[in-house]
Every structure is written in C-alpha cells, then in structure tokens.
Image (spheres, rainbow, N blue to C red):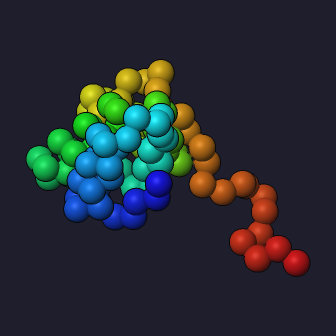
C-alpha cells in the first residue's frame, strides 16, 4: 500500500490497515515538527499498528521517537539516496 500526503491520505491508510490483518511497513517521507492534533493522532495510530516504520534521516527518527509516535526499536533509518552517486548516472 502506498499513501501520499498527510492528513486525509493517512486517515484513509489507517482505515485500510484496520480492515486488513497483514503486517505492513510505514515509510515517512516528511516528518512535521509541528503537526496538527489530528495529524499527530492519525500518524501515531498508523505507526503503532505498523510492523516497522522507516524514515530517511536520523533527525526524523529522533522526532518520531521523542514525540512518542513509535517505539525506537520499531523505527529504522533508510537513507533517501546513496552518497557519491550522481542524480543522473551516465
């Protein structure tokens, strides 16, 4: 399942995951430093149901664990790009 966006997209993803029993991984492309109360509520519920949460940076990992969105042992940093590679390989 791929969900883009924040808010309505996440709420829809939460509904889908409540109806399905398969494990799933949540990848957070953007972690908001000041989410609305609803965004924080939905994000926390979605991440707590996930088998694993991935983020692109150590800063994002710290933000979600410090906010109590997900336990530290269930969040993994997967760098968004490999250093040293050109964006347009030849």
Query: In this view of the protein, which residue sits in the foreground, 56 or 27?
Result: 27
Q: Residue furthest left?
A: 37
Q: Residue at x 72, y 72 (%)?
A: 87
- Please give the count of numbered marks on the rendered protein: 0
Side of 84 relative to 46 (left or right):
right
Side of 79 relative to 5 (left or right):
right
Q: Residue at x 60, y 43 (%)?
A: 78
Where residue 59 appears, x then y in whole percent? 44, 41
Side of 25 relative to 46 (left or right):
right
Where residue 86 appears, x then y in whole percent? 77, 69
Side of 58 relative to 66 (left or right):
right
Residue 32 seen by the camera: no
Please determine whether, in this image, residue 47 is positioned above or below residue 56.
above
Where residue 5 appears, x then y in whole percent? 34, 64
Tell me the quarter of the picture where residue 81 sits.
Answer: bottom right
Where residue 16 appears, x then y in whole percent? 32, 49
Residue 29 seen by the camera: yes
Q: Residue at x 23, y 59 (%)?
A: 7
Locate the C terminus by quadrant.
bottom right
Tell me the quarter of the picture where residue 82 sits.
Answer: bottom right
């Amino acid at each position: 399942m791929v969900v883009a966006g924040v808010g309505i997209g996440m709420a829809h993803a939460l509904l889908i995951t409540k109806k399905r029993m398969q494990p799933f991984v949540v990848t957070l492309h953007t972690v908001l430093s000041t989410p609305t109360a609803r965004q924080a509520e939905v994000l926390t519920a979605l991440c707590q149901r996930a088998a694993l949460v991935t983020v692109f940076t150590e800063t994002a990992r710290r933000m979600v664990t410090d906010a109590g969105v997900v336990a530290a042992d269930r969040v993994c940093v997967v760098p968004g790009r490999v250093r040293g590679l050109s964006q347009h390989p030849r």
